[in-house]
Image (cartoon, grey):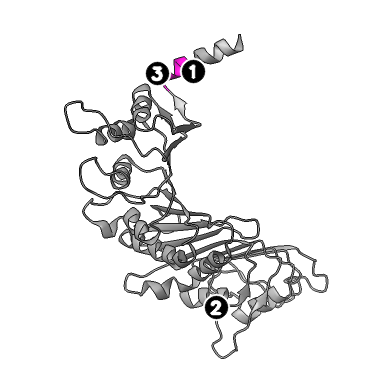
């Protein structure tokens, strides 16, 4: 049930507000309080939401608006009114979440947002719908940023994770998230969240990445993969790394963040095939691999074993000399550290990694001797 205030809410003494947040209720949308705003939030308004033209009137009356958020709100459309666009030159933050598809299209096509603004767009997809059509509106911003990137393309972060249980407790769908952080002060970051069934995540993320592929040939993006899941090794079409390799074969920097053991092993096997297997590595121009996990022991031991050479001496095949292996966060024990040293003796790098066992004691002794 939505509360609707009386039309003359403030009588003749309407306050000069800079920030207005409306949630689960309506307002007299033509009220003088909805002008010259700096911040406007409309959230969870099903009934009594403003019509699209009234919303655009509010935005047009607030040329200095810096923050705009619209989510879970049924903006009413008028198909008989000609489309128009509103300039918001001072907008620094735009958040549009889970509107009906037609509403999402109308809102995004009706406002001009500076490329320097931070944008977060969230949408849903249906299994039977064509992905190109479904994601066209949210990906247009991605293309505009890629076209404007001049000095290096920036970082693409892709994440798979469970949807917030408090939002749709009966759903078993996950969110696929793509974040683009372009290099340069004049371009703002963009986050695109797509709620869809898990089997569509690889296609969704690769489709979004593919929209910007034509603009990355000179300077490929840095890839940051968060919580990606293990796939059947033989099923290349369901593997995100394999799909991204086809889209960005010249990538030089990859970060693997928060991967479970099975997914970590799956990624390493594809990036660095076992010596003598005859398999070609993905991303042959890779120069930096960053691993961020709470613990590094188990995958380090597996990686050392995976790189073991066949033959009498039983040595390991080191990683390419030009490859930096960087560990971030978490902990590693003596055996794990030494295993990785054998693979990348000159290029192994640790950042905020807690050393355990003999390594920890040696480090503490070194600090003590330095102090004295």
Tag 2 secondary structure: helix
> Which type of secondary structure does the marked residue at label 3 adopt?
loop
Q: CA distance from mark 3 to mark 2?
A: 60 Å
To which quarter of the image does residue 195 belong?
bottom left
User: Residue 251 versus residue 303: which sits nearer the camera?
Assistant: 251
| Residue at the disc numbered 1 | 363
Left/right placement of residue 310 relative to residue 104 reads left
| Quadrant of the snapshot with the N terminus | bottom right
Which of the 4 quarters of the picture holds residue 371? top right
Q: Position of residue 278 (x, y in %)?
A: 21, 47
Q: CA distance from mark 1 to mark 2?
A: 60 Å
Q: Nearer the viewer, residue 343 or 42?
A: 343
Which label's residue is closer to the chain start, 1 or 2?
A: 2
Q: Is residue 340 magenta?
A: no
Q: As displayed, is residue 264 above or below residue 29?
A: above
**Magenta residue span:** 356-363
- Position in image of residue 24 (x %, y %): 57, 65
Residue 287, placed above or below residue 116: above
Magenta stretch, main secondary structure, is: helix
Mark 1 vs mark 3, CA separation in Å: 10 Å
Which residue is farthest top? 372
- Residue name at image x 61 percent, y 8 percent: 372
Checking the image for residue 106, the label placed there is 2
């Amino acid at each position: 049930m939505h509360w609707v205030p009386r039309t003359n809410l403030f009588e003749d003494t309407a306050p000069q507000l800079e920030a207005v947040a409306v949630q689960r209720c309506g307002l007299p949308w033509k009220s003088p309080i909805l002008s010259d705003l700096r911040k406007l939030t409309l959230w969870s308004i099903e009934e009594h939401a403003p019509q699209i033209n009234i919303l655009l009137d509010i935005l047009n009356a607030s040329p200095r608006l810096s923050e705009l958020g619209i989510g879970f709100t049924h903006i009413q459309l008028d198909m008989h009114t000609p489309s128009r666009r509103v300039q918001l030159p001072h907008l620094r933050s735009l958040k549009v979440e889970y509107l009906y598809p037609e509403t999402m299209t109308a809102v995004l096509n009706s406002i001009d947002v500076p490329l320097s603004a931070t944008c977060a767009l969230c949408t849903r997809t249906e299994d039977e719908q064509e992905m190109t059509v479904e994601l066209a509106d949210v990906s247009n911003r991605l293309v505009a940023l890629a076209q404007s990137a001049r000095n290096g393309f920036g970082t693409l972060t892709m994440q798979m994770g469970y949807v917030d249980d408090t939002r749709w407790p009966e759903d078993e769908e996950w969110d696929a998230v793509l974040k683009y952080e372009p290099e340069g002060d004049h371009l703002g970051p963009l986050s695109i969240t797509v709620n869809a069934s898990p089997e569509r995540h690889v296609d969704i993320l690769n489709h979004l990445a593919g929209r910007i592929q034509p603009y990355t040939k000179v300077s490929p993006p840095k890839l940051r993969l968060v919580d990606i899941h293990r796939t059947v090794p033989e099923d290349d079409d369901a593997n995100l790394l394999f799909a991204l390799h086809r889209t960005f074969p010249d990538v030089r920097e990859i970060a693997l963040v928060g991967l479970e053991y099975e997914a970590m092993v799956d990624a390493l096997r594809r990036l660095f095939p076992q010596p003598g297997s005859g398999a070609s590595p993905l991303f042959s121009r890779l120069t930096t691999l960053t691993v961020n996990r709470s613990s590094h022991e188990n995958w380090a031991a597996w990686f050392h074993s995976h790189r073991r050479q066949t033959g009498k001496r039983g040595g390991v095949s080191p990683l390419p000399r030009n490859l930096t292996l960087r560990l971030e966060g978490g902990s590693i024990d003596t055996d794990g550290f030494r295993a990785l040293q054998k693979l990348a003796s000159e290029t192994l790098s640790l950042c905020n990694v807690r050393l355990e066992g003999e390594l920890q004691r040696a480090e503490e002794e070194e600090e003590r001797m330095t102090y004295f």
